[in-house]
Image: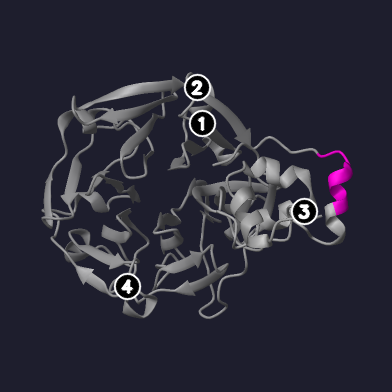
Amino acid sequence: MAETTPQCRNKTDNDSFDENGTLLPGLPDDLAQHCLSSLPPSLLFSVCRPWRRFLYSPSSPPFFSLYALLSPLQNPQNTVEFFSFDPISSSWTPLPCPPPDPPLHLLHRHPSFLSRTLPVQSLTVSNHLVLIAATTHKLFPALSSPLVFHPESGSWFYGPRISTPRRWCAAGSVRGVLYMASGVGSLYKGDVARSLEQLDLKKKRENWRWENKAQLKDGRFSREAVEAVGYRGKLCMVNVKGNAVKEGAVYDVGLDKWEDMPQGMVAGWNGPAAAMDEDVIYVVDEVKGSLSKYDGERDCWVEVTELEQLKRAEQIAAGGGKICAVSEKRERIIVVDVGDKPAMFWEVAPPRGMEVVAVHVLPRIINIDKTS
């Protein structure tokens, strides 16, 4: 993900490009686009309007942006709204509205239990943002089908119907395939608590189908919303959040088989986790505020950095060499550049009057008008 430092631009002779939209004088647009594609997005944004228009066009390689589920602080309905944060212009933009039918009712805080948040589970799969489980105001499952946002087209749509809609579950992805395991629907059911289903988002949308896979041995992963992390062809998850005693399970995608989680992995899984390109798992120790990565060869966690701002982090996402964490009390997003040594970090505040429910990293939306 690109840096979030606001870009400033002084008026220069290059502003004369604005009159005719020329990218590079003397070069045809296709060749000029090829030359400009290798430049940093921050430079394309700051030089002139034609370059800025190119940056947000389908012809320009997309840079990573933040996608957030936000909840208004002063809203008795406790609804969830969807926004994208552009790190180049340092600005928030509302996403298009989801389909009106069926109406979307996602409860983040129940009016009778304001101190407790209810899970609204979302994840990224094959460059899509997917909402998979949530609760209505009547404490029923809110989604009978996954709600999917596609940044490249800027559109929402519903996927195929879920056999048993969930209020919460274990959800993750491996190699472009969505996995939904365990969880609770309107009521607890043992077969649902042991279930595993997959949805292949790499296929054409008309061929999307839920498929049953190998069941869990018991229903211990159904007690709360669980992050299932894709890692080197496997799906890894623990049954309890935070520093409590927990159990871990690993699903081997190729073998369609569950196995025990390595002892070192489960011992250090003490907070929210996410994988970078499904190759490195990162976890935040919610008590210490330390960010660590998993060393599979030695079955241990290696500390990357320790930050006061990461203590009690609610959720993390990974992408573009950055770890993005929802802070305690959901007041801001902490972005850590794990490629830097030492790791650098900065904060992103949500729009005024909003709290952060969840954050994700995806390519920026095509054709957002930021040319002025």
> How many residues crowd mark 4 within 10 Å: few (<14), some (14–19), many (20+)?
some
Q: The disc labelled 1 sits on which kind of residue?
A: Val
Q: What segment carries the magenta color?
A: 9-16
Please give the name of the residue rendered at 45% of the width and 53% of the height, measured from the top-left corner.
Answer: 118
Query: Is 283 placed above or below 371 here?
Result: above
The reply to whether the C-beta atoms of the residues labelled 2 and 1 are less than 8 Å apart is: yes
Left or right of residue 279: residue 24:
right
Please give the name of the residue rendered at 70% of the width and 56% of the height, measured from the top-left corner.
Answer: 27
Foreground residue, 179 or 60? 60
Would you name the residue on which mark 1 appears? 336
> How many residues crowd mark 2 within 10 Å: few (<14), some (14–19), many (20+)?
some
**Residue 137 shows in this picture:** no
Foreground residue, 20 or 179? 20
The reply to whether the C-beta atoms of the residues labelled 3 and 1 are less than 8 Å apart is: no
Where is the N terminus found, in terms of image quarters?
Answer: top right
Would you name the residue on which mark 3 appears? 25
Please give the name of the residue rendered at 26% of the width and 53% of the height, measured from the top-left corner.
Answer: 222
Classify mark 2: helix, strand or loop.
loop
